[in-house]
Image (cartoon, rainbow, N blue to C red):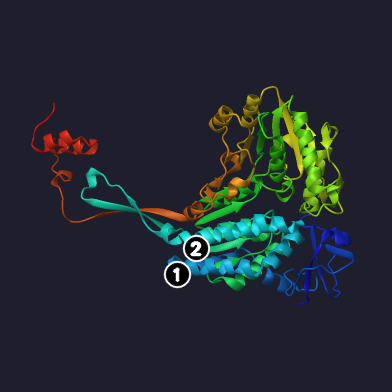
Amino acid sequence: MRTLSVLPFQHCSSVGGASSFNKSFIYCYTTKPTFSSTLRFKNCTQFPLYTHAVCSVTLSEMTTEQRERERFDVEKAGLLMKELRTSFNSGKTKSYEWRISQLQSIAKMIEENEREIIQALFEDLSKPQFESFVSEISMTKGSCKLALKELKSWMKPEKAKTSMTTYPSSAEIVSEPLGVVLVISTWNYPFLLSLDPVIGAIAAGNAVVLKPSEVAPASSLLLAKLLEEYVDKSSVRVVEGAVAETSALLEQKWDKIFFTGGTRVGRIVMASAAKHLTPVILELGGKCPAVVDSKINLQVTARRIIAGKWMANGGQTCIAVDYVITTKEFAPNLIDALRNELKEFFGKYPMESKDLSRIVNPFHFRRLASLLDENKVSDKIVYGGQKDENQLRIAPTILLDVPEESMLMKEEIFGPLLPIVTVENIEDSFNVINSKSKPLAAYLFTDDEQLKKDFVKNISAGALLVNDAIIHTTVSSLPFGGVGESGMGSYHGKFSFDAFSHKKGVLYRSFAGDSSTRYPPYTPEKERLVKALMSGNILGIILALIGWSKD
């Protein structure tokens, strides 16, 4: 096949085709092909930086027979599942040695391909190199390093207490792998959010299928290439594709499904899993609020809100600050501080800044633009608002007191728009938050100790963070996951190992100490003894044994 290149959308002057096609990237051959009528490319001005040797896209030059052979359907998904089930049933993934070797291979893969990963992230999202290293490469390395260090202790059975009823006995909790699991990843952190759960699944001893997001095609293709090269492909596989491929995978009976994405697709995943009674972990999102009190270090607060919004993939992050709540009196001070720090970080012309990620594709650009252009919203802009669809860029934008019924305040923004909601008293912010679905994270900035306690007591969210934003995800001893519509289940650190393990209770007894009390014929004396044993009343047990009764 001809060489295929992944080309950023802005390098071609015209793109036509089906609306489901990901227009943030187009696929161009390096020799002139005959294109089909459903996918047209005109006037490509340059070849991209990232060129792949093997074409994964089939166009009109391929015959129907070839396309059918390449298509990943339910039948092929079933064959893949059969292969992985055979591999898992052989027992090799359960061994400590296999798990360690695969984790070491992933660590090596990241180390040896750091430049390629950064390049793919730049092509998919124009993600700055610094941000790519900190939020994707470094965190994935950290997960791998922790699993390698702690795996032996994680695998060790936990001792459990026994009861008087089973005396003499001992008990333990054994962590066993679930089997063959499916990880469906997302596009905003395509390496971290693909590999982090895969690391947990491998550490727990499972066979794994990873389905990366087609919305980040350069990252998806690189993940498929690297994992095939570095890990045991008889037990760890990657399936690329879009809706059809994901649907084919969801038709299979998995032992667990781990999904990261939006609530709409999350419901589809959960419904598919329910047909097989397959357990799921759903890492979704929601509108993550930041409450800003007046008792703060204003400059540090502004900087940390910016880090938790615009430095988090341009706001395209499930735990990014979605909106801010502060008092009417304090809002002007906060806006001035945010404006000053944004200029300090991204310059007078942020649209030209190389330290901001772009919007992932035209669909999401238009979605964000429509939120901004909605009636009674556009006139609420107090900073920013500039847009450039050709470059898929929207400037950091602050809005003040947009209508509560606007889409900006109803749906998760997932972009560089930050509404500020004002209240009379800072305590009123709790009612604002609790009037919406439970978020994946909620943030509070204050030096007021009582307000901190009230916030923890009254706000339900996947996680709470006081006086910062998003960095709680770097603490491996804390679970990461949602509650309510922001998700179910959690992972990170040992929680990832536990997420893909079954906690099997095991009770050990000898043949000694067998009592006739549990066997017929049942007598009043036996009943008294059983009641005493089950109540744990030592005096009652003694009296029952010697034939006395307290009655």
How far across and how far down the image is residue 107, in percent?
Answer: 57, 66
Dot 1: element: helix
On screen, residue 108 versus residue 308, left or right, reads left
On screen, residue 424 versus residue 379, left or right, reads left
Dot 2: element: helix
At label 2, the amino acid type is Leu
Figure quadrant of residue 228:
bottom right
How far across and how far down the image is residue 119, in percent?
Answer: 74, 64
Mark 2 to mark 1: distance in Å? 11 Å
On screen, residue 374 versus residue 256, left or right, reads right
Q: Is residue 236 above or below residue 523?
A: below
Q: Quadrant of the C terminus?
A: top left
Figure quadrant of residue 538:
top left
Point 79% across, 50% down: residue = 363
- Mark 1 = which residue? 97
Q: Can you name the residue that lies furthest to the bottom here?
A: 1
Q: Is residue 333 above or below residue 129?
A: above
Q: What is the number of the mark on residue 148?
A: 2
How far across and how far down the image is residue 492, in percent?
Answer: 54, 52
| Labels 2 & 1 near each other (Cβ < 8 A) | no
Point 52% across, 70% down: residue = 83
Count of marks, rendered view: 2
Instruction: Tell me, yes or no, if residue 278 can be seen here.
Output: no
At label 1, the amino acid type is Glu
How far across and how far down the image is residue 365, in percent?
Answer: 80, 48
Specify few, some or many for label 1: CA neighbours under 10 Å numbering under 14, 14-19, or 20 or more. Answer: few
Between 72 and 230, the one nearer to me in the picture:
230
Between 280 and 196, the one nearer to me in the picture:
196
